[in-house]
């Protein structure tokens, strides 16, 4: 079975600063995908970034980057130059092939002006 | 990305009534649809997986007679909460994908049972 662990229930960051949201995972499958989603108060799930287990380089999407350390089974999300609009819940998720996404408990990020 | 819609976005009903939530993939065909449930300030919990034309597979602890799932076509899945009670109040999110491609999420349905 797959398991995702997010140990930070809440995080605060100053506007324009960078912040790292932690995520560790556990799976016995050699092939899997790692995802980060943002969920604002409206409830919609917004896809941010994806990392494949065989990808050699860390994924980046604009201000989002994924610090993938396969041996440690960690997939931390780094948000650079935080903006007030980044305040939301952030979920780490994973799935091996042909399985549904499994989510961590989430981290609530609050960006302070 | 692909678009998944849910209807209604918000529903309030009396205890004992049944509520149907629709999930549609608007610009792609979904061989598999997933239903998640999210309590306030909690994570998304997978309720069931449905493949078009076959019975849904429910996660442990989810009552299949309580949460009826139908995936009759490649673009539509429905979740019916039967004889709803206040404890069924939650945010229900559907997700859809073609084969083993990316999962796309609907905007969610907020159910309140009085």
Image (cartoon, rainbow, N blue to C red):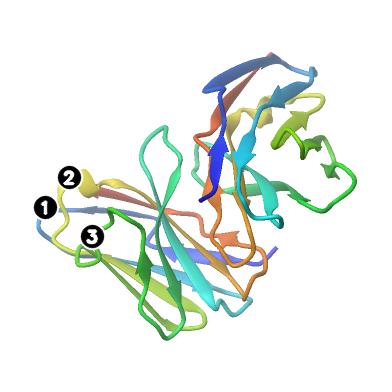
| Mark found first going from the N terminus, 1 or 3 | 1
Mark 2 and mark 3 on one chain: yes
Q: Are marks 1 and 3 in contact (CB under 8 Å)?
A: no
Q: Residues within 10 Å of mark 1 (few under 14, many from 20)?
A: some
Q: Nearer the viewer, mark 2 or mark 3?
A: 3
| Numbered-mark total | 3
> Which disc is residue A112 wearing?
none
Q: Quick one: label 1 or label 2, which is nearer the N terminus?
A: 1
> Residue at the spot x=85%, y=41% of the render?
A58
Mark 3 lies on residue:
B63
Q: Which residue is mark 2?
A: B86
A74 w.r.t. B32: above or below? above
Q: Quadrant of the C terminus of chain A?
A: top right
Q: Is residue B50 above or below residue A55?
A: below
Q: Residue furthest front?
A: A28
Task: Check residue B15 in the rendering and tell me which mark sits there, or answer none.
Answer: 1
Viewer-side label of 1, 3: 3
The location of residue B6, given as percent across then percent down, is 45, 63
Instruction: Evaluate if marks 1 and 2 touch, with contact meaning CB atoms under 8 Å apart.
Output: yes
Regarding mark 3 in the picture, which secondary structure is present there?
loop
Quarter of the image holding residue B93?
A: bottom left
| Residue A38: % across, % down | 62, 40
Which secondary structure, mark 1?
Answer: loop
Q: Is residue B70 above or below residue A102?
A: below
- Residue A33: percent from left, percent from top: 69, 53
Q: Chain of mark 3?
A: B
Label 2: how many residues lie within 10 Å, few (<14), some (14-19) or many (20+)?
A: some
Sequence-first tag of 2 and 3: 3
């Amino acid at each position: 079975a797959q398991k995702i662990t997010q140990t930070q229930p809440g995080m605060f960051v100053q506007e324009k600063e960078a912040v790292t949201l932690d995520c560790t995972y556990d799976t016995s499958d050699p092939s899997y995908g790692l995802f980060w989603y943002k969920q604002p108060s409206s409830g919609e799930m917004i896809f941010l970034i994806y990392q494949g287990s065989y990808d050699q380089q860390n994924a980046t999407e604009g201000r989002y980057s994924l610090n993938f350390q396969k041996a440690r089974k960690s997939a931390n999300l780094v948000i650079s130059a935080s903006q007030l609009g980044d305040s939301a819940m952030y979920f780490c998720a994973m799935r091996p092939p042909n399985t549904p996404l499994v989510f961590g408990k989430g981290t609530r990020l609050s960006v302070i002006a | 990305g692909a678009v998944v819609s849910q209807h209604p976005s918000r529903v309030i009903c009396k205890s004992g009534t049944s509520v149907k939530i629709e999930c549609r993939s608007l610009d792609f065909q979904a061989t598999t649809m997933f239903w998640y449930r999210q309590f306030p300030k909690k994570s998304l919990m997978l309720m069931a997986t449905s493949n078009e034309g076959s019975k849904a597979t429910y996660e442990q602890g989810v009552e299949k007679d309580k949460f009826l799932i139908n995936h009759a076509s490649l673009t539509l899945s429905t979740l019916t909460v039967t004889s709803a009670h206040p404890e069924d109040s939650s945010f229900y999110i559907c997700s859809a994908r073609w084969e083993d491609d990316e999962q796309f999420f609907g905007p969610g349905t907020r159910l309140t049972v009085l």
